[in-house]
């Protein structure tokens, strides 16, 4: 990780937020949602040999990229027990797909994870009303104590000889903590895909402005955006998916 990383001051952040919000309003997300797989196109362009699927749930993301043509190695991470059991079953017939039963973050140990009624909205962070009002089925229905690790601490055990990695993070507001735990392996990462929230959906969540700034300092440029979670009443974008490439 580069030395001297700084977070925007309050006035700078306000300026950046206004500029970025205006930019988002000008984006035609439907036009950006192309029919071919931009992910697999970028994976091929960057000669990726390993996809890290962080926050795998039951393997929906892997199913998508496999269907779209990616045939390389995948390592999925899922902390919740029921979801991991289904994930492992789904991966059992794919010799290039491995799974780890853990969350990734900025420390090693245990943490409490909130289980959502729809499963895929589960998060370490408390959910806010904005999320719940637009997705009532995401209400938390329980908690589970799970193992959490820095990706750095797993080292060569998981990376092997792979030097060109695609890092996908879907951790429901916990993206920055995952990135903080990757500092010693980021030199092997060529592309990062993660959810970027326009408004807070989880308590203490880092929003898109600071994530974009953080990744820019680390040498990654935002190259693609796709509409994600939207307000059911107004249609405004609450969250979008972004892909960043190493410059």
Image (tube, rainbow, N blue to C red):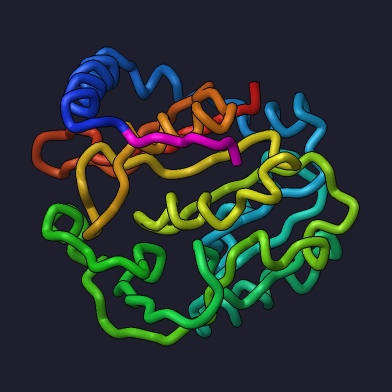
Residue 236 placed where, x, y %?
18, 32
Q: Residue at x 67, y 53 (%)?
A: 52
Residue 240, located in which quarter of the rendered image? Answer: top left
Viewer-proximal residue, 133 or 219? 219
Asked which quadrant contains residue 235, the reply is top left
Left or right: residue 97 versus residue 6 is right
Magenta span: 1-7
In which quadrant will I find the C terminus?
Answer: top right
**Image location (x, y in percent) of residue 165:** 74, 43
Which quarter of the rendering shows the N terminus? Answer: top right
Left or right: where 24 falls relative to 212 = left
Q: Position of residue 205 (x, y in %)?
A: 29, 53
Q: Residue at x 23, y 28 (%)?
A: 13
Q: Residue 173 at x, y = what percent?
A: 35, 54
In percent of the image, x 54 and y 23: which residue is there? 221
Look at the picture and state if 100 lies above or below 22.
below
Question: Which is nearer the eye, 72 or 244?
Answer: 244
The overriding secondary structure of the stretch rendered in magenta is loop
- Above or below, 192 relative to 137: above
**Up-down relation of residue 98 to residue 201 (above or below):** below
Residue shown at the point (76%, 24%) measured from the top left? 45
Based on the picture, tell me whether residue 185 belongs to the magenta stretch. no
Along the line of sight, the residue nearer the viewer: 94 or 105: 105
């Amino acid at each position: 990780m580069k030395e001297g990383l700084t977070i925007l001051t309050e006035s700078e952040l306000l300026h950046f937020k206004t500029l970025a919000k205006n930019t988002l309003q000008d984006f035609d997300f439907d036009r950006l949602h192309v029919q071919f797989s931009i992910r697999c196109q970028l994976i091929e362009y960057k000669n990726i040999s390993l996809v890290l699927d962080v926050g795998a749930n039951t393997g929906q993301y892997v199913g998508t990229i496999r269907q779209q043509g990616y045939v390389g190695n995948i390592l999925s991470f899922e902390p919740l027990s029921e979801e991991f059991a289904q994930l492992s079953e789904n991966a059992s017939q794919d010799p290039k797909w491995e799974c780890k039963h853990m969350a990734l973050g900025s420390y090693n140990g245990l943490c409490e994870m909130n289980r959502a009624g729809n499963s895929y909205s589960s998060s370490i962070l408390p959910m806010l009303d904005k999320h719940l009002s637009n997705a009532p089925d995401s209400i938390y229905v329980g908690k589970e104590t799970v193992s959490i690790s820095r990706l750095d601490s797993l080292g060569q055990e998981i990376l092997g000889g792979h030097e060109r990695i695609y890092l996908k993070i879907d951790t429901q507001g916990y993206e920055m903590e995952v990135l903080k735990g990757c500092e010693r392996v980021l030199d092997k990462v060529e592309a990062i895909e993660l959810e970027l929230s326009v408004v807070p959906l989880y308590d203490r969540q880092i929003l898109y402005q600071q994530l974009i700034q953080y990744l820019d300092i680390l040498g990654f440029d935002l190259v693609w955006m796709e509409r994600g979670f939207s307000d059911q009443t107004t249609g405004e974008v609450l969250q979008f998916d972004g892909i960043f490439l190493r410059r």
